[in-house]
Image: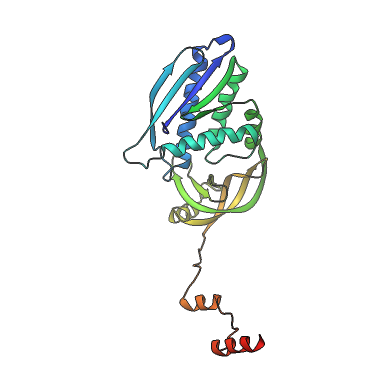
Amino acid sequence: MANVIGIKVVGANDTVYLPDFLKAGNDLMELLTEIDVSISPNYKRTVDWRLKTLSYSSPALLEVEGEAKEDQPDNRTNIIDTTLRGIESLKKSSERPRGFSDKALDVAKDLTKLLQNGIKTLEIIFDSGSVEYEISILDNVGIILTPGKQMYGSIEGRIERMNSHDEFNFYIYEPILNRRIRCELMDTKNLKLKQEVISFYEQAVIVSGLLYTNINGEVSEVKAISITGKEVAPLLKNASEVTGIWDLTGGENPVEHIRRMRDDS
């Protein structure tokens, strides 16, 4: 089924120890949940995962089936596809996969570490195949999460989430890399800036401040100093602009223009 995903663990000497299997299963659930929240349009969980298959031989097998929450969009197939594509990408590349937040990357790294601690093979399985974990994931995740530079600059995107627990923060959806970037206020006591941010909720904005990047140059976090609305100019303001686009006569009377073209030919 397209809404089923699982994990298969093969232990060294055909023995799978319970802590390793439980760790693999818990990490898989944490990874699915983090990706669910990351790609959800409202930044909330959209799926519950129920146990479908459990086998404790070697290989040990755990499968879960997604159930869409009643008040949320059906995001099950997208979550599974994003997870599989992301793990496959991390085996080969140090570019951040779509939907993989820093937390998701940490979980993917923890799963991979099981290959260094008594697990022979580890696979994520789905309806038509599997994706096998490889040690290369550790290096590639490490590169993505390695702090890079700090610089002053700006990012553009849409405010999609706010959080007032502890210190106020908000998230910008950045369309080019298709990911969310966490933002905080440089001055946590700047109530004027906080109100400006709130007023731009779900709008396109430009946030300026101290940018934190990883080693690849991706902006991972922003300490905001200012925020402005980003105007989206319409492609056409009035009908006259349409005629202007297709004006091939240079302002000449169309009849005279065609007659001249015939004479020239």
Residue 114 locus on image (x, y percent): 58, 20
Question: Compared with residue 67, is residue 156 higher up or lower down, i.e. above or below?
Answer: below
Q: Nearer the viewer, residue 156 or 8?
A: 8
Q: Residue at x 48, y 30 (%)?
A: 128
Residue 4 locus on image (x, y percent): 42, 29
Q: Nearer the viewer, residue 16 or 251?
A: 251
Q: Nearer the viewer, residue 159 or 61?
A: 61
Residue 172 locus on image (x, y percent): 51, 49
- Quarter occupied by the C terminus: bottom right
Q: Residue at x 59, y 12 (%)?
A: 12
Q: Residue at x 54, y 89 (%)?
A: 255
Residue 99 locus on image (x, y percent): 52, 40
- Quarter occupied by the N terminus: top left
Q: How is the image coloured?
A: rainbow
**Number of dots carrying numbers:** 0
Can residue 166 be seen in the rendering of this structure? no
Question: Compared with residue 145, is residue 170 higher up or lower down, i.e. above or below?
Answer: below
Can residue 203 be seen in the rendering of this structure? yes
Q: Nearer the viewer, residue 214 or 246?
A: 246
Q: Residue at x 62, y 35 (%)?
A: 145
Is 222 left, or right, of 33 in this rendering? right
Question: Compared with residue 259, is residue 50 higher up or lower down, i.e. above or below?
Answer: above
